[in-house]
Amino acid sequence: MTARDSAPTRILLADDHALVRGGVRLILDAEPDLTVVAEAADGAEAVALARSMDIDLAVLDISMPLRTGLQAARELSRLRPELRILILTMYDNEQYFFEALKAGASGYVLKSVADRDLVEACRAAVRDEPFICPGAETALIRTYLDRAEQGKPLPDRAVTEREEEILKLVAEGHSSKEIGDLLVISPKTVERHRANLLQKLGMRDRLELTRYAIRVGLIEP
Amino acid sequence: MTARDSAPTRILLADDHALVRGGVRLILDAEPDLTVVAEAADGAEAVALARSMDIDLAVLDISMPLRTGLQAARELSRLRPELRILILTMYDNEQYFFEALKAGASGYVLKSVADRDLVEACRAAVRDEPFICPGAETALIRTYLDRAEQGKPLPDRAVTEREEEILKLVAEGHSSKEIGDLLVISPKTVERHRANLLQKLGMRDRLELTRYAIRVGLIEP
DNA sequence: CGGAACATGGGTGTCGGCACGGATGGACAG
DNA sequence: CTGTCCATCCGTGCCGACACCCATGTTCCG
């Protein structure tokens, strides 16, 4: 319902892989209501272009040199609050999802989704509607959306301090008994914390917890 | 100068990110002499499709579930030596480059290159010419080519191909039964390979194998 | 005050990881 | 030809991971 209904949405596309950028550009330019008017190969370039050009929507990859897509999103939503931001990433990771929302992004799209979904996410972002990425981490996103509907704020950390302590030790390969001995609690309590972590993060076993811990930098590979 | 001069090259495109796949497909299909006739979302699907369909060229991403692009390349160059293989990846990594050549790939293309370069790499592969990706590690590639000219072999790894296959699948969180079904072997054989891996690498359980697989780049965190 | 969130502890049961023992056949080198 | 390496397969048994149920005490907030 903006004044832009007739003019196509002007998009900035930021991804450090030129080939991916070129492909996504073709996908978006094929839509009559969307047009890519700028490309950036890193986060700094994305911020510079979005400041200097007439852009409606920025589509940002997370893993980029100089500045990540999330850092760029924070900067841009400060500088130009009216700019819509879409985070496009390969990481189906609830931590990144929260970071993206806190950074001012109006959508979070996985690279594993189909072309159609990206197009729809762009349109939803322009209409200022949240977009639920099909296939994205459902458990925590549900939790978030439920809270959002009730006007409740985001929890700063989905994972509590105690849980993070257990998470690190589990990811390092320690058994429940070892962890219990170390923290001077019952092994059953360790298992309870671990189960809560699995449920919170929507994961199935220790292996996924380990990869998660590596992703968030809690342990080294 | 083949009999195919008039018919377009039939391409299998394998990448676990549907969005990237869709974009690259648009890039390739825009060329009159190239046509994407099949898409795969993982390495196992890629092998199955390339076996059953009439394919001239397989474009394989390295990081895929179930089987990496390199593992799929090894399998395919055994099964169908006349098939041309192009490895498409974000990793500017000399180790992967060597592995790709040993696996029978005729080209190695970085995702950071422009659309034109991928198209040219496809054409070069079909003409059976090696394609040196602009921007790829040049020094070590020189070293390799020098060695190859002198007929010297590349050093073998301690971990066998089969073991690496099992390693990747174990690290991805699959059970022995799942892996056995996928590779069409007994779950007990999977457990034997896993036990050999644990013994060879001096590790205790799946978690350590997972971290190892991440360190060597076999899977993503 | 009453409820929510957190940390604590328990019981029971299934299933898979892993160790240990064994075997066979094929490929390749010395 | 013989030995070594690899891939294949089997049985037995222990133990830990994980799911599902349950309860208690504290803290903090509306």
Image: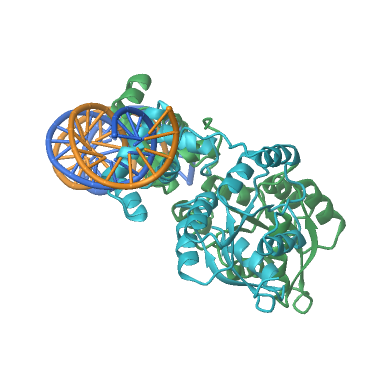
Chain colours: A green, B cyan, C orange, D blue
Q: Nearer the viewer, residue C30 or B197?
A: C30
* Residue A186 in view (yes/no): yes
Left-right relation of B57 to B163: right
**Vertical placement of A50 versus B201: above or below?**
below
Q: Nearer the viewer, residue B6 or B147?
A: B147
Left-right relation of B162 to A19: left
Q: Position of residue C22 (x, y in %)?
A: 18, 33
* Residue A130 in view (yes/no): no
Q: Residue placed at 45% from the left, 63% from the top?
A: B48
The image quadrant that residue A28 belongs to is bottom right
Query: From the image, which quarter does the N terminus of chain B lie in?
Result: bottom right
Residue sitting farthest toward the right: A52
The image quadrant that residue B25 belongs to is bottom right
Q: Residue placed at 53% from the left, 59% from the top?
A: B81
Q: Residue placed at 40% from the left, 31% from the top?
A: A170
The image quadrant that residue D1 belongs to is top left
Q: Position of residue B183 (x, y in %)?
A: 36, 53
Left-right relation of B114 to A90: right
